[in-house]
Image (cartoon, rainbow, N blue to C red):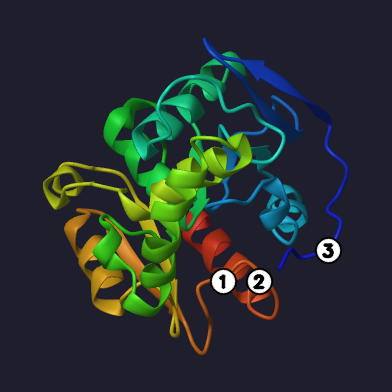
Amino acid sequence: MTDQFVPIPPVRTGYLKLADTSLYYRDYGEDTARHTLLLLHGNGESWHCFARQVGPFSEAGYRVITLDSRGHGSSGRGSLPMTPQQLAADALDALTLLGISKAVPVGFSDGGNLALLMGILRPDAIEALVAAGPNLVPAGAKLSAQLPCELLYPPLRLIGRRIPAAAHRADVLGLMVDQPQIPFDALYQLQLPALILGGERDMIRPGHLCHIAQALPMGRLSVLPRASHFVFREPWAEEANRRVLAFLRQVLR
């Protein structure tokens, strides 16, 4: 369910032209801000999933940018493969197009995977990262969350041969069925401050979140009591925001 809270109005909105498509972004801040947060949504979502974060993060002095990943929200699908690596590369390209040399990706769920991948692909472009409910492999999710995706994916692929909307849905769902495939070894080399957020009742296995945080040389794990996977929604948004901002105050200079 989408949170209906309306955030503060953006300073600017628009589309960033990539080689094969365009990505929709919203910019809440000025170029004079010392640090930029790039908010990356989860599977099948859009910038709206951060309705409870844009205001508090902006008021804390950060330039906040939301980005709809390819094939999501108001962004185009394009012709390139729908993989976490491609979506992370898109996000890095978006930073370049916006003239931002360094940013802090704050990702939720699949967006958390992208935050990790951005750090792996271009550590020079990342100051720190926040990943809420990420997973390195599909098995990182609990069976109760993963099984429905596994069952729905094959018929969507089949129907998608004739119905474009089904093909598109299968592409998006594939980000959870076939992907991600991020080796733990890649995290060992990631010398960046990293906050891994999770809920006590998260759909990601608690041990998996713990292993991700432990694999990151500068990683730390923060688990919200009684929270589900959706830590950036009510009733947990305020506490999640507090933990993110406290982390950023500690690691950014």
Task: Determine the CA span between mark 1 and mark 2.
Answer: 6 Å
- Is 214 on the left or on the right of 40, as rendered? left
Say which residue appears at 45% left-offset and 61% top-offset: 152
Looking at the picture, which amino acid does disc 1 mark? Answer: Val
**Residue named by callout 3:** 4
**Residue 129 in sight in this render:** no
- Is 174 on the left or on the right of 165, as rendered? left
Examine the image and state in which quarter residue 235 appears.
bottom right
**Residue named by callout 2:** 237
For marks 1 and 3, give the one nearer the viewer: 3
Task: Determine the CA span between mark 1 and mark 3.
Answer: 16 Å
Query: Under tag 3, what secondary structure?
Result: loop
Specify few, some or many for label 1: CA neighbours under 10 Å numbering under 14, 14-19, or 20 or more: many
Q: Position of residue 139 (x, y in %)?
A: 25, 65
Q: Is residue 33 above or below residue 159?
A: above
Looking at the picture, which amino acid does disc 2 mark? Answer: Ala
Q: Position of residue 75 (x, y in %)?
A: 66, 30
N-term-proximal mark, 1 vs 3: 3
Looking at the picture, which amino acid does disc 3 mark? Answer: Gln
Q: Furthest-top residue in view?
A: 19
N-term-proximal mark, 1 vs 2: 1
**Residue 60 in sight in this render:** yes
Specify few, some or many for label 3: CA neighbours under 10 Å numbering under 14, 14-19, or 20 or more: few
Say which residue appears at 17% left-offset and 43% top-offset: 186
For marks 3 and 2, give the one nearer the viewer: 3
Mark 3 in CB contact with mark 2 (< 8 angstroms): no
Mark 1 in CB contact with mark 2 (< 8 angstroms): yes
Query: Under tag 2, what secondary structure?
Result: helix
Q: Which mark is residue 198?
A: none
**Residue named by callout 1:** 231
Q: Is residue 188 above or below residue 213?
A: above
Query: Under tag 1, what secondary structure?
Result: loop
